[in-house]
Image (cartoon, coloured by chain):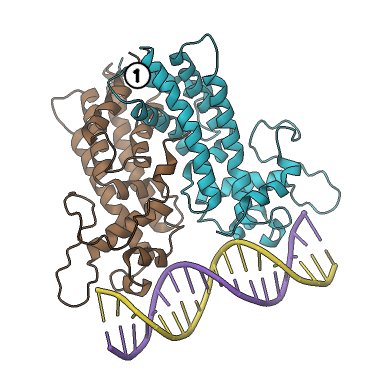
Chain colours: A cyan, B brown, C yellow, D purple
Amino acid sequence: MTADPAAAANAQSSTSTSSTTSSSTPAEAAAPKRSRRGRPGYDRETLINRATEVFVSRGYDGTSMDTVARELGITKSAIYHHVTSKEELLHLAISRGIRALDSAVETESLRENVSALERLRLAVRASVVILIEYHHSVTLLLRVRGNSALEREALEARRKIDAKVRALVEAAIAEGGLRSDFTAGLITRLLFGMVNSITEWYRPSYPVDPDTIAEAVTTMAFQGLEA
Amino acid sequence: MTADPAAAANAQSSTSTSSTTSSSTPAEAAAPKRSRRGRPGYDRETLINRATEVFVSRGYDGTSMDTVARELGITKSAIYHHVTSKEELLHLAISRGIRALDSAVETESLRENVSALERLRLAVRASVVILIEYHHSVTLLLRVRGNSALEREALEARRKIDAKVRALVEAAIAEGGLRSDFTAGLITRLLFGMVNSITEWYRPSYPVDPDTIAEAVTTMAFQGLEA
DNA sequence: GTCTATACCGCGATAGAC
DNA sequence: GTCTATCGCGGTATAGAC
């Protein structure tokens, strides 16, 4: 909508660049961490996490800055102390998921001395795990429609990741590890359609642990559901 | 991660002059049918179909009535001649998909003299076909977040359909037709997660025909991808 | 059936006090 | 770091002419 999301992103890199961020929380999680002395207030990290959750719950376009503010118990003006625009909030929210997903797929697809089928299996597993660890961020990413320059960049990032997976599928078919009666494109889409659908229902309270989910996905995809 | 988001994004049809072109598709399709004498104008049916497409392309909340109007080549006021509100447009758009999906699953799950596994397979196939035939309507339905009473009703309708499928999965497990090492809930979610993901990338121009897609889905889900 | 014009309000964003 | 107050745009929806 507005403009120049890239500039906005750079301007803020001091706190959010890479992995050097504080403490222990693995990926997401609304860590309160009130450390300062004066007013309660929020640190940027917490604000981003909470905003991401609200965006996921109501949709980005369906969420006003006032909704985010109420969720945090502050006013919308206070949010602008931490970020310069709503779009920057979206950028911060989805870029974590993009980075995590991309590096995981990259890592697994480049493993040496392993068949393409096995690398694909590893990529699927890794994706499931990341999708759960960065649940809100990835969910938001998967819902982007391309309505702004920022959103189109996100779609482009997704396309690049998709291409890596597809190459893996193609290699696995060529090796004879995967059935060849369907195209690599169709297999890739259905396979990751299943993986990505996890975002729609997964909750930290879900009674099945992440490893079992990853196991179910790979088993179902590669061996099938029949007894 | 992905399934070709870029292609899906902003699929805006080049112009709004595409009037008297197509006409065949049974369920959706912007049937032109200019019959009256005076001004060109649109009938309600066409308006709903076109609006549904725009909602899918940019998201419901991300689409203004003015956007829909421009897509049709008329002004927003003209739209209010056909519908009373934007929300009614949403209702009309998604209810077709709900009805079609519900009756298909209902029909297949009640078939007699057929194993639960086979009924499940038929329900999956039927869902894929309907999802393609009512593509835009179902896509919109699957994206509803529950931000209004209408949206919550849609979510409730989805829940009811899900319950029918899950009962089928449970019966298939009990019969020994499906593997029992994962819960029926998890299997249902992954299975229909894969089915529903088709909405994200399917286009009438997709080089694989609907039957082959349905075949790929059932094969992958029940027999697995390995060669 | 569509138009222009307009009422009315919610949204993103800013200014300046505390 | 958050507040109140406010600006201005763009949103849904309506009135009434053609």
Percent coordinates x, y for residue B138 in the rendering: 32, 46
Location of residue B139 with respect to A196 vertically, above or below: below
Which quadrant of the figure has residue A63? Answer: bottom right
- Taking A141 as reference, is A46 left or right? right
Percent coordinates x, y for residue B194 in the rendering: 36, 32
- Taking D9 as reference, is B45 left or right? left
Q: Residue furthest top?
A: A113
Identify residue type, mark 1: Leu
Residue depicted at x 43% and y 41%: B5
B167 or B155, nearer to the observer: B155
- Disc 1 designates what residue? B225
Location of residue B42 with respect to B30 vertically, above or below: below
Other residues around mark 1 within 10 Å, as few (<14) / some (14–19) / many (≥20): many
Residue depicted at x 52% and y 53%: A148
Residue depicted at x 32% and y 24%: B221
Residue depicted at x 50% and y 56%: A62
B21 or A182, nearer to the observer: B21
Location of residue A203 with respect to A86 vertically, above or below: above
Q: Is residue B152 visible?
A: no
Q: Is residue A151 visible?
A: yes
Percent coordinates x, y for residue B31 in the rendering: 20, 58
Percent coordinates x, y for residue B123 in the rendering: 24, 33
Q: Quadrant of the C terminus of chain A?
A: top left
Q: Chain of mark 1?
A: B
Label tally = 1
SS class, disc 1: loop
Q: Quadrant of the N terminus of chain A?
A: bottom right
Which quadrant of the figure has residue A175? Answer: top left
